Amino acid sequence: MRITEILNRELIIPNLKAVDKRGVIEELSEFLFRKERVVDRGQLVNALLDREKLGSTGIGDNVAIPHTKLKELNDILTVFGRSKEGIEFDSLDGKPVHFVCLLVAPEDSVGTHLKALAKISRLLKSNSFRTTLLNAETGDDIYQIILKEDIEIESRMEGR
Amino acid sequence: MRILIVGGGVVGFNLAEELSLEGHDVSIVDNDHARIKKISERLDVMSVLGNGCRASILKKAGIEDARMVIAVTNIDEINIVVCILANKFGVKRKVARIRNEEFTGESQIVDPGEFFIDQAINPEQVIVEFIIDIIKTPGAMNVAEFADGEILLRGFDVPPDAPIVGRRLEELKEVYEMDSFLITAVSRKDSIIIPKGDYMIMPEDNIYILVAKDTLPLILPMLNKKVNEIQRVVIYGATLTGCSLAAELETMVRDVTIIEPSANRAEAAASMLSKTMVLHGEGTDIDLLKEANIDDADFFMALSGDDESNLLAALLGKKHGAKKVIIITNEPDYLPILDSIDMDIVINPRLITVGAILQYVRKGRIRSVVKLREGEAEVIELDTLPGSKVIDRKLREINFPDGSIVGAIIRNGEMIIPNGSSSIRAGESVVVFALPSAISKIEKLFGKKKIF
């Protein structure tokens, strides 16, 4: 899977305003609502927060991947947000979160969401990549940096 | 297939037992009278008394028809010679236990392949990898891998304040389907069961989870496990295992301390390791343990070569505040006792070696087998044979034996969490969790009879 299959330029927020978990989940849901990608932001917020109650999706290294399913979707929906200041997310390693990748899957998606989850967590594994991402100026820059890293990872995988 | 084992110690004996039960034609060579007697009394295998380095003895044990030779005597050099001879006899697959790092480590001069060894098993290395895996999954008590490392099996104790406590499995369905994990078994008090949808997770349960490699970080918070929990490790015994483990740990945790009774070994360890603090003395010396800040240790690992000292040191370590204890014991008979006195993780180097060798032997239809709680349950990764009854049928329509569950289907190298309406396609492999009563039926369903 290439990152372009799940992430598009329109759905990148270079500077998140929220400072905590609930705030950022509301901010991202509101963003998707205004972009007319979801019809009910309240439902999305609740589903995401419900999942967080079971355990934080802050997987460590300043990354969080909140995720859930929504019946109304036909395709997987991804929005990527960055916070230079950091968000309190009750993470696995206790660190604040700089990168939030929100993932919403259609009800019947079987393998795609796992591929997407795996893709995102692999992508954000590299220290130097995260540093570059944190220092990027604009949403366009962020998008380009992500595409470039994805191509590098894929070519390394093929080289094996 | 015919398998010749050279060396009838604990490893050879257990291998012979397991492999003959699986239907292989096993013969075993050892130069010790008592061992051969024990083998011929207890096992249904051919046993030959004599020196395994001699071609005539190997011939007597049937090497000319053997498809595989497994050399597991105490001495590396003998094991090497056995493999060289086996090659002369045209044996296809040759496995040897090689302890010396100079043969297997990064600084090796000669590759084991140059001695015609297809697979060299170094117990110390296997143990180090096992312990590192445990440390990387905070709170895990059991670890194993399937599908070339894409699927992980992890055993956890459930703390009282874990978010999943009090939830029924069916409530978690949506989450585990999305996050790609499955609770395949639970051991509560002393029995191990395969939970159904109405099972409610309770504190103190030990749960066994199959999880995709990439989503492991998502399940740890559900069990209230945090990473980087382990920052201080105290090791008793600057053995090969102790030192190579310390060398790896130096790069992962904040403080590593080794306690070693022999002055020579302590000195050697100190010169080999850079960040580790090496203390010279007994592991049962309370003042020394205190000097090693045992009360603040996240892990105390008793890895010396002496079972009794390990036991005493581990008990003292625990009493004086070490949060978790790993202990090595060479005597398999101690295993149940150690469980009953609350040792968190017990390692038997010989049984670990047996496991590693079996994994290699079984390459083929059965890819790997992991025994849990001393064989009270098995987790098996197996290929579906063409023509097997399970192919292209909905799982709920297949008559799986009680005490078994398909935990994962491996499709194109990725983990699929199955439900009743999933089906297995030809050529795919599965990970099955089974209690002993169900194992032979499972093997039949997947067509194990025609194995090898």
Image (cartoon, coloured by chain):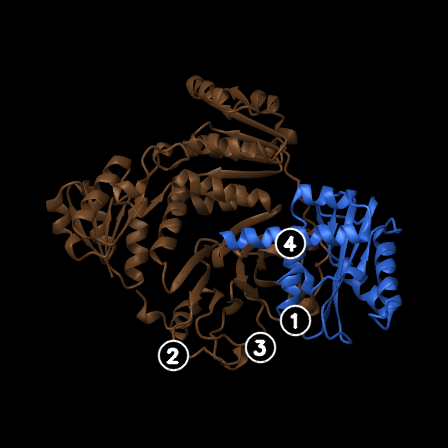
Measure the C-alpha gap from mark 3 to mark 1.
15 Å
> How much space separates mark 4 and mark 1, taking CA atoms?
42 Å
Residue wearing tag 1? B198
Chain A: drawing colour: blue
Residue at 55% across / 51% down in the picture? A156
Residue positioned 34% across, 35% down in the render: B103
Query: Is residue A38 something one can see in this rendering?
Result: yes
Is residue B105 depicted above or below B23 in this figure?
above
- Chain at tag 2: B
Residue B326 on image: x %, y %:
52, 39
Chain to which the residue tagged by mark 4 belongs: A
Give the number of the disc on residue B420.
3
Q: Nearer the viewer, mark 4 or mark 3?
A: 4
Q: Contact (CB < 8 A) between labels 4 and 2?
A: no
Chain B: what color?
Answer: brown
Circle 3 Cα neighbour tier, 10 Å, few/some/many (<14 / 14–19 / ≥20): few
Please state which amino acid type lies under the numbered disc 4: Asp
Q: Which circle marks residue B387 in the picture?
A: 2
